Image (cartoon, rainbow, N blue to C red):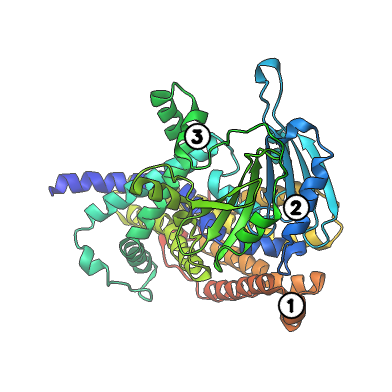
Amino acid sequence: MKSLTIKKLYTIHSWVGVITGILLFVVAFTGAVAVFGRPELKIWASPEIRTPLTLDPIRIEQLVHEYAQKVPANHFDAISISVPGVRSASALLIRYEYHGHDHENGGPDSVIQYDFDPRSYQLLNEKRSDFESLFADWQYDVADFIVNFHADLHLGRPVGLLITGLLGLTLMASLVTGVIIHRKILRQMFTFRPFKGFSLLVNDGHKVMGIWGVVFHGLIGFTGAFLGLALVILVPAAAYVSYQGDMDALIEDFTAAPEPVLAQVDAPTQIAGPLRHAFNFHPDSVATSTRIVGYGDQNAVIYTNMIGGPQMYGQTLEYQGASGEFVQAFGNFGKVDGVSGIILDIMFPAHFGNFGGVLVKIVWTLLGLSTALLPLSGIMLWLERGINSANPKFRVTTYQRFNRLVIGSCGGVVVACALLFPIQLLLNFTSLNLPNNQLIFGSFFVSWVLCIVWALMAFDAALTVKWMTRITAGLLISVMPLDALLSGSHLFNLFTTQHFVSVAVDWVLFAIGCLLWWLSARWQPRSVAFQSTKIH
């Protein structure tokens, strides 16, 4: 390839990284944490489900029938049951839904939700609202916050999904241009000199992470772009072209859980049998939710969503409602012929590592951290080369200011994430009398902004990095003793409490904190970008 073309691609590679690098780090880092968001961090953040649960299908059926007598008859369009401790629910949730068939006459969608204690099955809460208000009022914990922040930066649809989807595309563009411009790729695969200066560490680390992880980075970029842009651009565009703008018709044609044709003949819906079958479907499968369509009708259908099992993607189990008989198991895109349906089904688990158990999640987290470090190390390289260039494009102070912005933005989001863990414990086990969302959102964004301001105002960038790392380490190290003090859950009573997941999370955070403290003690960058220079 001509040197002029290589030079142009290098320029594109550099500026794409500089412009989007901070956001790429933020999204990739929170994504690495979000791999364990559900169920591990969800269980840790929810005291009521820290001890392993065994749900009683018969008791759940009784609750569905009992509370069906207390809701209006038009709220049987669908009944949803959310299993606690698997996805976002920490209680047993039963929703009776009205889908507003008389929209033309002003009839809104509405839902009546009952929250039950998953052990005693006592009613905890009742909510009556429309769908939008129900989910807008959701009280976030650390797991919900991090998972949703990774998905859309808490900007919602379409803005948040559009941004994260475009970041997936920029990651793919950076990978393609990076592979092309590095013509000595085979030699660079095995060159890593971590103890010969900061510049060589960053240079070699950037290339090694990029080359060895190129397949994973590409997978994350592609699936992230698809998940971010599908609902915002791809589905509306396909509906406009082929379905006269009817997105509901498109989704119905492509998804494999059709609405049943009701017989208008009354018949009791069997719920316990299908739930029992789903709970024991496969040793590695877990039921996440159940949806009953046509409750009380002879043609009622029950769908149970499953994750795990021998296949990589989740499955939906279908049951005949009146008899409770198992009908079939299929993927979400089972209607799509050929390999396309399978590819669509594996998009989500491939992005989050939700297959293959904890070992796969560990691998996905470590590789996800390398994806986060890739744009960060790229920015550091750009700063080094810009400052040391014979004809720099900007003044040295400009590079140093940008470096401070990078430190505050990237280091700040790490500090903010670490802060959420002790905050969650204080919310769970003390009487702060503050809504979860107010404290979780406030502590995260305020601490992040303060870190950015601190980095921009600090005279010594290297010292700022050291102390941000130590603050992060201190926050993570504090989680285990704080949890033991406030909840009484610790290693020495593990077999009594059976808090296996939450104690494991405490110890992992403690180990990461110790590692970060050790790294902070060795942090001595000899780079002009980190020199102590007062900003005028």
Number of residues whose C-alpha sits closer than 10 Å to that of mark 3, classed few (under 14), some (14–19) or many (20 or more): few
Q: Position of residue 484 (x, y in %)?
A: 77, 74
SS assignment at label 1: loop
Question: Residue at the spot x=22%, y=63% of the render?
Answer: 185
Q: Nearer the viewer, mark 3 or mark 1?
A: 3
Number of residues whose C-alpha sits closer than 10 Å to that of mark 2, classed few (under 14), some (14–19) or many (20 or more): some
Image marks 3 and 2: residues in contact by CB distance under 8 Å: no
SS assignment at label 2: helix
Q: Image quarter for residue 335?
A: top left
SS assignment at label 3: helix
Task: Kindly identify which residue carries mark 2.
Answer: 61
Count all numbered tags in the image, as a single digit: 3
Is 294 placed left or right of 311 in the picture?
Answer: right
N-terminal of the pair, mark 3 or mark 2, is 2
Q: Nearer the viewer, mark 2 or mark 1?
A: 2
Q: Nearer the viewer, residue 140 or 369?
A: 140
Question: Residue at the spot x=49%, y=71% of the render?
Answer: 359
Residue found farthest to the top: 105
Q: Nearer the viewer, residue 148 or 278?
A: 278
Label disc, if present, on residue 252 of the rendered structure: 3
Task: Kindly identify which residue carries mark 1.
Answer: 490
N-terminal of the pair, mark 3 or mark 1, is 3
The residue under label 2 is which amino acid type? Glu
Q: Mark 3 and mark 2: span between their CA atoms? A: 28 Å
Question: Residue at the spot x=41%, y=53% of the render?
Answer: 220
The residue under label 1 is which amino acid type? His
Whether 126 is drawn above or below 355: the answer is above
Question: Residue at the spot x=68%, y=20% of the render?
Answer: 102
